[in-house]
Amino acid sequence: MKRDSVLARVATGAAVGGAIGGAVGAVYGTYDAIRYKVPGFLKIRHIGQTTLGSAAVFSLFLAAGTLIRSH
C-alpha cells in the first residue's frame, strides 16, 4: 500500500475527527451534566455518552470530507 493512499488519508481524517470530537464532547458533556444537575454516577455516564457520540459523528464527517477531497 502506498504511503499516501486514499485509505490512509481517510483513516487519518477519521482519527483526527475522533480526537477533536471526543475533546469537544467531553467539554460539552461536562457542562451539560452540571447545567442540568445530573445526579451522582449518572454524570459519568452522561459525559461518556456525549463524548462518544460527538467523537463518532465528527469522525464520520471528517472521514467523509477527506474522502471527497482526496479524489
Image (tube, rainbow, N blue to C red):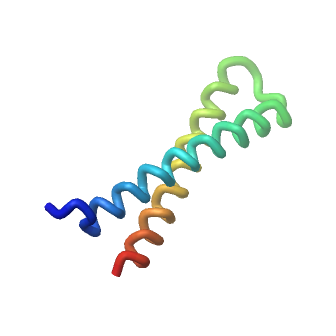
In-image side of 57 versus 32 (left or right) = left
Q: Residue at x 17, y 63 (%)?
A: 2
The answer to whether 51 is drawn above or below residue 5 in the figure is above
Q: Residue furthest bottom?
A: 71
Q: Residue at x 81, y 31 (%)?
A: 34
Total number of numbered discs in the rendering = 0
The answer to whether 60 is drawn above or below residue 44 in the figure is below
Q: Position of residue 46 (x, y in %)?
A: 65, 34
Q: Residue at x 65, y 33 (%)?
A: 47
Picture quadrant of residue 38: top right
Q: Residue at x 49, y 63 (%)?
A: 62
In depth, the one of 9 and 47 nearer the eye is: 9
- The C terminus appears in which quarter of the rendering? bottom left
In depth, the one of 46 and 20 nearer the eye is: 20
Q: Position of residue 27 (x, y in %)?
A: 71, 38
The answer to whether 65 is drawn above or below residue 3 in the figure is below
Q: Residue furthest left?
A: 1
In depth, the one of 32 and 70 nearer the eye is: 70
In-image side of 27 versus 60 (left or right) = right
- The N terminus appears in which quarter of the rendering? bottom left
Q: Position of residue 39 (x, y in %)?
A: 76, 22
The answer to whether 55 is drawn above or below residue 2 in the figure is above
